[in-house]
Image (cartoon, rainbow, N blue to C red):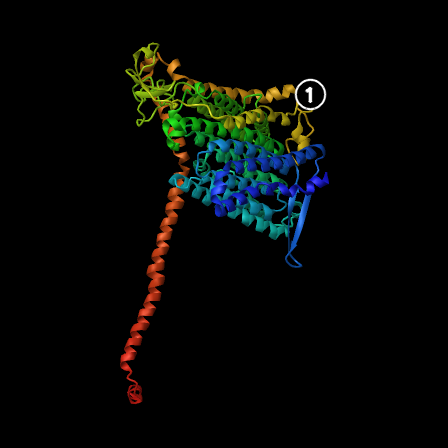
Amino acid sequence: MEHTYQYAWIIPFLPIPVTMSIGFGLLLVPTATKKFRRMWAFLSVFLLSIAMVISANLSIQQINGSFIYQYLWSWTINNDFSLEFGHFIDPLASIMSMLITTVGIMVLIYSDNYMSHDQGYLRFFAYMSFFNASMLGLVTSSNLIQIYIFWELVGMCSYLLIGFWFTRPSAASACQKAFVTNRVGDFGLLLGILGLYWITGSFEFRDLFEIVNNLIHNNGVNSLFATLCASLLFLGAVAKSAQFPLHVWLPDAMEGPTPISALIHAATMVAAGIFLIARLFPLFIVIPYIMNLISLVGVITVLLGATLALAQRDIKRSLAYSTMSQLGYIMLALGIGSYRTALFHLITHAYSKALLFLGSGSIIHSMEPIVGYSPDKSQNMVLMGGLRRYVPITKTTFLLGTLSLCGIPPLACFWSKDEILSDSWLYSPIFAIIAYFTAGLTAFYMFRIYLLTFDGYLQVHFQNYSSTKNSSFYSISLWGKEAPEAVNRNVFVSTTNNNISFFSKDTYKIDDNVKNKMRNFSTYYGNKYTSMYPHESDNTMLFPLLVLVLFTLFVGTIGIRFDQGIIDFDILSKWLIPVENPFHQNLNYLMDWYEFFINAILSVSIALFGLVIAYILYGSVYSSFQNLDLINSFVKMSPKRILLDQIKNMIYNWSDNRGYIDIFYTKVFVVGIRRLAKLIQFFDRRVIDGITNGVGITSFFIGEVIKYMGGGRISSYLFLYLS
């Protein structure tokens, strides 16, 4: 067993050969490298699969024996200081390694088809392999110096991948925004590491935890300074995991290709901040103020992310805000001391959200031939609808991922989210109320995404049944059912059996005789098959979706805490090291069915209420609300209608303007820094340069005067001197 641990250092280095080979190949033999480009995708999947097998072996050993292993190489600089590098394998490292490798393999397989027509295919796989290596190096690091090195490499890979399509101005701006925002957190992380080293004299985790614990209990260190150092460390996690107030980069990061969003911004990179808090949990838990800060930031992010997702039209941005909110749940769990529950939700959310992002990529892939390849169109849910007829497999997988994230049993996220909600009651009733309320909002906006995408009719081809814009509360669903004016909804195209059919509608009202009011014009299109309706993705893209569905269905069973009498389902408690936990001090504690139902019935009821509200507002408006003209006229002048419209507009403006936080940052920081730069430029040119130039000019004129006064004769100098 120790032999396996000793060679665990190979895990982060396995993906590196792909990156180096592609890089050198494109420099030395670009033609041959591009000719066999599919080989590099296979090699990426193969090497990451080896890393997954090693990680699985280590995880099995962790579950069976909770064996912790640390292997170090010492680099002595002088007699007083030395750096030690190595790998640290414990339950947390094995969990993260399994998460990164399993999701990474699915994303790489998916990307082979998704990026097949992109000119940057090889560059994409080089970046992805380097990111996987950096992330695996981060989670197996043995000290804070290693963590910081790989932390920066992960940030660099994120910058490259977000700006993958760098010729697009929005992508270039997004990667710069992510880079600058994360620099704030990274600088705080560096200061926190240096502060802890100044206190303890060590970068190693075990030494650091033991020394800080002794110093705090013996009052050997200033508690304010220790809290400051811990807060700076937490600042790094806030930026990387897109927590308030450094969350602004995550929605813009959706400018990258969708597989990147699935891997980096759902399952792995945004989990790096969570990993840092979990890794340093023994340090944070002895500082009460920092735990309160973590829980406060978590609960603010939970609510903020959910409210910002309510009215988004871009499907990937909606999922990005959902990721932000769910990471807030995990941060809240860590802040209230629920270490096991936080990691449980990290696992379940990673697989569910990766499924949703890859599903959104399949949707975008099917919409691009119809609406074009601009993200403003292909990712716009306003132009979708009715896709269940055309992409049934994607629809089923997306629905399961949606229900899981909503907390519907027996899917994965239900088990973990329910534990977080239950534990939050023991910590703070106010936090619990916010968490439960956000659970309802989560169900609402997630089911809204599903209904706008798959329910009803394809919005590119149909206009809302009511031709009056915003004519009533019932005629048009909130925030997204209204098609933009740029889309010609009177003409739509269908291709079947090598014929293109153009349909021109005489009416906007959908009724039973609508087919009789359409005129059919057929045009033969030769032998070339084209489809102006969405189509299901290829098997290479569907296979990862089906595998992730299995994870979404069954991964929640590893944390079920019921006493079955025969089989103990709680694998996660065996996997994790028992830590000081105010809610689950005994990890062998098993919940009975009655207690479970009491805790779960409230959360499930709230989630179902959110689903019902979403269905009422967004579900099949064409079939459900055809004959509501009487109701529309009845409520047209109702005071309640006016109040509802005001509330609707307020929520829409809040979500559409991103809570006005980006505007605030732009006006205060961006505009403020630019004005300060102009002021400094003016001071530098007019004052500093003015003084320098003035001294030079003055010296020049004095020299000229002296030059003309002096003729080189000693008698003249004596005359001037004596006179």
Q: Quadrant of residue 477?
A: top left
Q: Residue furthest bottom?
A: 715
- The residue at 57%/51% (across/down) is 194
Q: Is residue 68 left or right of residue 233?
A: right
Q: Quadrant of residue 329?
A: top right
Q: Residue furthest left?
A: 708
The residue labelled by disc 1 is 564
Give the image location of residue 677, x and y in percent.
37, 52
Q: Is residue 661 left or right of residue 91?
A: left
Question: In the figure, 517 relative to 86: above or below?
Answer: above
Give the image location of residue 545, x and y in percent.
53, 26
Give the image location of residue 638, x and y in percent.
33, 18
- How many marks the image carries: the answer is 1
- The residue at 37%/49% (across/down) is 674
Question: In the figure, 452 relative to 3: above or below?
Answer: above
Residue 578 seen in the current view = no
- The residue at 35%/13% (across/down) is 628
Give 41 or 39, whichever is nearer the viewer: 39
Q: Is residue 133 left or right of residue 213?
A: left
Q: Secondary structure at mark 1?
A: loop
Mark 1 nearby-residue class (10 Å; few <14, some 14–19, many ≥20):
few
Give the image location of residue 505, x and y in percent.
30, 17
Give 633 or 363, whichever is nearer the viewer: 363
Q: Specify the amino acid type for callout 1.
A: Gln
Q: Quadrant of residue 279?
A: top right
